[in-house]
Amino acid sequence: MHDIRALRDDPAAYVRGWSSRGMTVEQADQQVKDILALDERLRAAQTAVQAAQSQRNDASKQIGQAKARKDEAEAARLMAHVETLKKTLEEQGELERTLKEELSGTGGVLASLPNLPAEDVPAGADEDENVEIRRYGEPFAISAPKDHVDLGEGLAMLDFEAAGRMSGSRFTVLKKDLARLERALGQFMLDMQTLEHGYTEVSPPLLVRDEAMFGTGQLPKFEEDLFSVVPLTQLSDDEKFALHRAQIEKAGRQAASDLSDDLTSASTIAKAVAQSIEVNEADSRETLRHIDIRRRHWLIPTAEVSLTNLVREQITPEEELPLRLTALTPCFRSEAGASGRDTRGMIRQHQFYKVELVAITAPEQSNDEHERMIANAEAVLKALELPFRAMQLCTGDMGFSARRTVDLEVWLPSQGRYREISSISNCGDFQARRMDARCQKRGEKGTRFVHTLNGSGLAVGRTLVAVLENYQDEGGRVFIPEVLQPYMGGLTHLEPDA
RNA sequence: GGAGAGGUGGCUGAGUGGUUGAAAGCACCGCACUCGAAAUGCGGCAUACGUGAAAGCGUAUCGGGGGUUCGAAUCCCCCCCUCUCCGCCA
């Protein structure tokens, strides 16, 4: 969500920002012009409505006074005056609502355009123009490395076939020590982030409302990446009846007013009413559909959604910032746009575990906090002694809500390249505006929007893949990293028939 | 799932169609009194948006949305949430 006043003050910054993120300069320039024009029209409508309301309020007050002193003639005169204001009130009011929705509504322009990149973000079109900022560790020399699928199946601990039978593609079943290793990784990461890095552990909802998804930026633009669930509860008969009654009353009023100067026969009226009711049956169904939507929940694609929304619609005292939150949760992604990509193995699943890090900070703290968070994520890879590199994402490769993002990529021997295992973003006040999450200094009047940051610390599924592939030996056994051994009851290797 | 009660400013809580943005109390801030504090007295004390150089002015907001009305915290409808009892359940 963008600040219309900031855009008014410095339109050029927005042209610059958006033209670096998938728009040409001309398109960005036009976009900004369109927004400013829309804003202009909205404020004109607003001013007109307010002027009319002001007059109406004055008149209403006088009507009250006139009635109090039994001056019915004066009251009637004033009521007639208000009647003349009605047209302006309705037309301009309708216009105002439409323009406002278009500009700053849930599906409006300001909510549908991506965050502006920070100044130091390299310009670029896609991932090929990301910039490596550092590298840790040397890829292990493994001759003819197996991939994690062959390793896992060789150990009889990984079963895509069974998963496919019950759930289809992009699901997996882990068994025995491999299932335990996944659990160990989650526990280890969570312990590190809470005990060593000061994050507060949270066990949040995995199902959230539209508003929460809007807050972090998944909605309205990326609905197709998500799973939704709708309870099978139907509307009660009472609710249906109430809805229909409201519709029929509305229809009846409409029909009566349409026919008021031509009351030819009862049958005409009946026909008209019946017709209106039929039309409103459709309206009614539409209303019912909206109620269903309101009862819908979304499965979180990352705990970023739940953790960040913890401060939504709240004013947090600045002394309490930064808030550092972490959670180990399942994540659910439809991967709609990825058909054909990473179809083999557990790199890209509909469901996976991830330890998420979220920080809520005061505006001036967020840059430092970002660096801290990157280090917190890197610490996990270092402890597991997995080779990785850190990539500063270019403007074209960043997510919708981010103003600056650094990805961590782990070495995968079977692919002979680095693959994303963590993504750490500073979103500035972009999400805070969408959530209305603010902070306030003690004893001071004004509030400011907080800054929000999120990062994986780490994706458990992909870490499991990295451990399997990097720690394999020629016999198909897998060494368990030392830091994980306490979580595995002292076990040092995964081996067949364990 | 059934039956019922309720959601008002930072908090408690009055208000059931007309100068009510909203009584009163608490909390908080300023001033007076005091050597200082307490107590007491007086005054102040919401947010967002529009407009304006500013002071200010205007509009909206009593869980959210819609409706009735010249006028809604107050009446009607829908949604969300909280609480109580019953039922069911990991």
Image: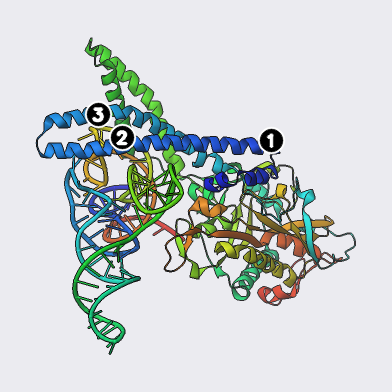
**Which quadrant of the figure has residue A286?**
top left
For marks 2 and 1, the one nearer the N-term is: 1
Residue at horizontal 48 percent and vertical 38 percent from the top? A101
Q: Residue lying at the far right in this picture: please name it.
A: A143
Inspect this view and state whether residue A205 appears: no
Mark 3 packing: few (<14 Cα in 10 Å), some, or many (20+)?
A: some
- Of tags 3 and 1, the one toward the viewer is 3
- Of tags 2 and 1, the one toward the viewer is 1
In the rendered image, the vertical position of residue A405 relative to residue A2, given as above or below: below
Residue at horizontal 71 percent and vertical 75 percent from the top? A483
Residue at horizontal 50 percent and vertical 42 percent from the top? A104
Q: Quick one: quadrant of the C terminus of chain A? A: bottom right
For marks 3 and 1, the one nearer the N-term is: 1
**Same chain, labels 3 and 1:** yes
Subunit ID for the residue under disc 3: A
Mark 2 packing: few (<14 Cα in 10 Å), some, or many (20+)?
A: few
Q: Residue lying at the far left in this picture: please name it.
A: A70
Q: Which residue lies under the disc numbered 1?
A: A26
**Which quadrant of the figure has residue A423?**
bottom right
Residue A81 bears which disc, if any? 3
Residue at horizontal 55 percent and vertical 48 percent from the top? A6
Residue A367 bears which disc, if any? none
- Left or right: residue A115 versus residue A241 is right
- Left or right: residue A316 versus residue A416 is left
Q: Closer to the camera, B4 or A20? A: A20
Q: Position of residue A262 (x, y in %)?
A: 25, 11
Residue type of the residue flagged with mark 1:
Glu
For marks 2 and 3, the one nearer the N-term is: 3
- Left or right: residue A50 versus residue A328 is left
